[in-house]
């Protein structure tokens, strides 16, 4: 699957419009939870992830067998697929720091897969900034995150996510 230049340009513009001064970003610390839009996790997404990771276990890719041989009643998303959705969910929900040149995953603590995401369900991200370390060329953020399943009390996963924004020290607002 190729991403068009127009899509890349639109994504870059969306990121640019969501950048806020560092002091405003700091005000998010231990503040309100931020939510992404809902994202559909369908069978084609699951199949594509299975191909990318070479994980074709029947619980993910064989709807009939998963319906009859699992307690889920059908196929489920890979746990790592669900975890990997955090990037797009965060892109939708979270602002960045003005002057950011690139963002990176720094790591995770306490990742817990709480509930399976069945094919055809929608999920969204819930984020709360709980730690922040600003340096001359970077901003490290610590987030309590959950991926919620529409209509379910139990989230698909919960984790502590640490991200790193590399910033231009002359452009941090």
Image: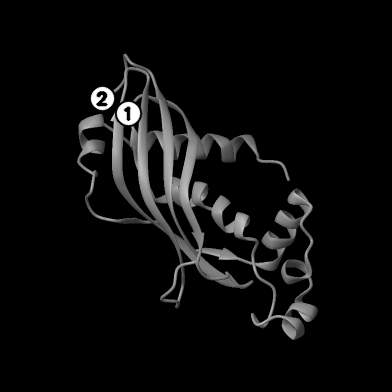
Res 62 seen here: yes
**Of residues 156 and 16, the one drawn nearer to the viewer in this rendering:** 156
Which numbered tag is attached to residue 98? Answer: 1
| Picture residue at 41% right of the left edge, 30% below the top | 165
- Rate crowding at label 1 as few (under 14), some (14 to 19) or many (20 or more) other CA atoms within 10 Å: many
Q: Position of residue 23 (x, y in %)?
A: 20, 32
Q: Position of residue 119 (x, y in %)?
A: 64, 71
- Label pair 2/1, CB-CB below 8 angstroms: yes
**Of residues 10 and 67, the one drawn nearer to the viewer in this rendering:** 67
Q: Helix, strand, or loop for circle 2? A: loop
Q: Position of residue 88 (x, y in %)?
A: 51, 49
Residue beneath disc 2: 173
**Of residues 24 and 16, the one drawn nearer to the viewer in this rendering:** 24
Which numbered tag is attached to residue 35? Answer: none
Which quarter shows the N terminus?
A: top right
Q: Helix, strand, or loop for circle 1? A: loop
Total count of labels: 2
Which quarter shows the C terminus?
A: top left
| Picture residue at 45% right of the left edge, 45% below the top | 91
Q: Position of residue 97 (x, y in %)?
A: 33, 32
Res 37 seen here: no
Q: Is residue 1 left or right of residue 88?
A: right
- Rate crowding at label 2 as few (under 14), some (14 to 19) or many (20 or more) other CA atoms within 10 Å: some
Q: Is residue 130 left or right of residue 4?
A: left
């Amino acid at each position: 699957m190729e991403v068009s230049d127009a899509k890349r340009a639109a994504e870059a513009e969306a990121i640019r419009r969501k950048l806020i001064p560092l002091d405003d970003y700091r005000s998010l610390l231990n503040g309100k939870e931020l939510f992404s839009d809902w994202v559909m996790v369908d069978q084609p997404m699951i199949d594509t992830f299975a191909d990318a990771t070479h994980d074709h276990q029947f619980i993910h890719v064989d709807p009939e067998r998963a319906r009859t041989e699992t307690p889920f009643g059908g196929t489920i998303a890979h746990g790592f697929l669900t975890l990997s959705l955090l990037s797009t969910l965060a892109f939708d929900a979270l602002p960045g720091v003005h002057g950011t040149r690139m963002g990176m995953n720094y790591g995770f603590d306490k990742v817990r897969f709480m509930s399976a995401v069945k094919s055809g369900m929608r999920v969204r991200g819930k984020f709360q900034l709980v730690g922040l370390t600003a340096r001359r060329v970077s901003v490290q953020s610590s987030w309590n995150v959950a991926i919620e399943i529409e209509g379910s009390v139990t989230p698909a996963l919960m984790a502590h996510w640490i991200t790193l924004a590399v910033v231009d020290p002359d452009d941090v607002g």
